[in-house]
Amino acid sequence: MKLHEYQSKQIFSKYGIPIPKGRVAATATEARRIAKELGGRVVVKSQVLVGGRGKAGGIRLAKSAKEAEEVATQILGMEIKGLPVRKVLIDQAANIEQEIYLGITNDRAARRPVLMASAAGGVEIEEVARTNPEKIIKVHIDPLLGLRDYQARDIAIGIDLPKEYWKQFGDICRGLWRAYMECDATLAEINPLVILKEKSLMALDGKMLLDDNALFRHPDLAEMRDVDEEAAAETEARKYGLSFIKLDGNIGCMVNGAGLAMTTMDIVKLFGGEPANFLDIGGGAGADKVAAAMRIILSDKNVKAILFNVFGGITRCDEVAKGILAALKEVKPTIPMVVRLVGTNAEEGRKLLADAHMITAETLADAAKKSVAAAKA
Amino acid sequence: MSILVDKNTRLLVQGITGNEGLFHTQQMLAYGTKVVAGTRPGKGGEWVLDGKVPVFDSCKAAVEATGANASIIFVAAAFAPDAIFEAADAGIPFIVCITEGVPVQDMMRVREYLDQKQVRLLGPNCPGLLTPGEAKVGIIPGNIAIPGNVGVVSRSGTLTYEVLYALKLVGMGATTCVGIGGDPINGTNFIDCLSMFEDDPRTEKVVMIGEIGGTDEEKAAQFIASKMTKPVVSFIAGQTAPPGKRMGHAGAIIEGGAGTAAEKVKALEAAGVKVAKHPEEIPSLLK
């Protein structure tokens, strides 16, 4: 789950990391009022869950409250990478001397968290990693010991941070580590962390990604999810415990198991079709889940055919077939449907579906070819 | 021969009284696996499945009484890390965690601790493993595979069943099939399994099923090129997956442009691995 900049910064602030004074506005008038309170010179920052906001013109400086209102009007009317801007953060403008990158993320390969910093802050760290990897200083953190003080110091030395900032930098690293750990984040990033002309450090931006699997122990954080920012179908799917990702094609896919669901998409493409979605109905999918999945797939008007691919292991094919029949009664789709049932009780499942006017397939390749043909017909 | 589990495996089931635990214990017993004990705090002294398996309050008590040498975990995600620590501290050398949805930071701590104790973990979020004709430790349906000379290792569940089934249809069988799970941080990886298959005299060829996310397949490719003498056939799921989206499995995500299927296929092909375009092509590539 992604958090907005303003949400991430609020969390950082709780862990003692200095952030600019600022508040969120949903209207331009509100933006003006906040800017006035902050003394006029502010940065107006679009709050959308995508990168590259600055390049898209979604982050702009305003020299007065009046200008803040004008800029907010423009930004609130924008779309950034397809997402409409619904909120802006109005932050007091800072006097920047230098920009630094600081972040903690999971290093899968090392199986440990990694603290990273670079004196080349402000730009995307992936870009720095590609062009100047030696400019990123890294230290892996033992998950049983936590971040040690010397490690933060090593990073400060590594990025040539002047001595007078080491203590504050250490405090910020420890705060970021605690925020990362206590919120079950998979990424906690400050980009940029700046040296102010006033000779102190401040987090001007903030980004956090949280582990969806850990949200059960963070009900307060789970509530911060911005459902306006995801496709309505994905929100709906989550409600039913389905894993769904919308794609641009026209063949709806309903599959049990994530790996098999990806494979089904791949094979549709291999035989000349375009998958409309990724959808894993999971194990033991009953009628209610299958019906919900079917409704979600059909809510996409591009879908011209549906492919059901179920490998019965523990999930029994006759149970899934019953689910499909119940769902058909409820949803009544008019587009062609291809079904492939293999494994446990597949024969019984096929018999149940014999009268349902579905196209049947034996192999995965056959199922893919038939659904591609059906979508073109 | 086989890897990790065989006829001598004495299995402990953690969370044996829950729906999943009980159902799969029954399936494993029916397959011939020696399930010697189960645990459920508060139900020690009871027996389940018509008196076939005794239940203990703790792993320690179960190991002392039954000599269990492997454990399988069916408890909920919130309690799974503790179950793993408990099994490791009870001296069990091989732990299989079926549970899906374990927080990744918990897994980093688990992995660090287990490495120090030299305990092997399989999973989490995995279907377990199957040595056809000998033992089934997990949820892979026993009837879809026959004994044979192919070692199978996979990050996926049902996709693995597809492959086992496709092999069975042409009369090919497996030595052992290992599901390592779809999480970003797990206990046993491709290289661990490839290395065991390389050393297993009965395994003559290997199938490796990967998916998008991380760099484990690339590392496996290096291992295959430098250390393996047995032929490896592979399939990578997620050719059409969009970047930045988690495709069901917590670990199946293309991040920062890394972990794409194309890169993995390229690395494997460069290592001399035949990569199937779709899973049903695998049996013909093994011939």
Image: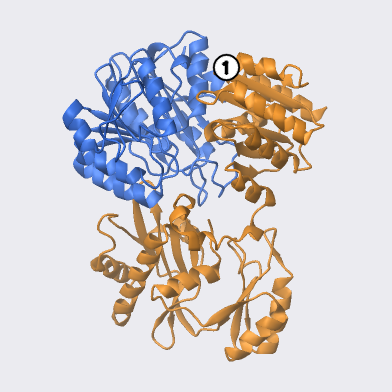
Chain colours: A orange, B blue
Which image quarter is the N terminus of chain B in? top left
Q: Is residue A288 above or below residue B112?
A: above
Q: Residue B116 placed where, x, y %?
A: 20, 44
Q: Can residue B3 be seen in this view?
A: no
> In the drawing, does residue B96 fall left or right of residue A284?
left
Asked which secondary structure carries label 1, the reply is: loop
Quarter location, residue A148: bottom left
Q: Is residue A369 above or below residue B101?
A: above
How many residues crowd mark 1 within 10 Å: few (<14), some (14–19), many (20+)?
some
Marks counted in the figure total 1
- Of residues B111 and A323, the one drawn nearer to the viewer in this rendering: A323
Q: Is residue A5 visible?
A: yes
- Of residues B37 and B236, the one drawn nearer to the viewer in this rendering: B37
Q: Which residue lies furthest to the left in this view?
A: B64
Amino acid type, mark 1: Asn
Q: Residue A281 placed where, x, y %?
A: 59, 35
Q: Residue B239 placed where, x, y %?
A: 58, 36
> In the drawing, does residue A193 fall left or right of residue A262?
left
What residue sits right under mark 1 in the picture?
A345
**Residue at the image point whose x is 73% and y is 77% from the top:** A73
**Residue at the image point whose x is 31% and y is 20% from the top:** B52
Q: Residue A279 placed where, x, y %?
A: 62, 38
- Of residues A137 and A346, the one drawn nearer to the viewer in this rendering: A346
Q: In this view, does B100 lie above or below B37?
A: below
Quarter location, residue A159: bottom left
Q: Is residue A126 above or below residue B274?
A: below
Instruction: Name the chain letter of the residue that bears numbered label 1.
Output: A
> In the drawing, does residue B60 fall left or right of residue A204?
left
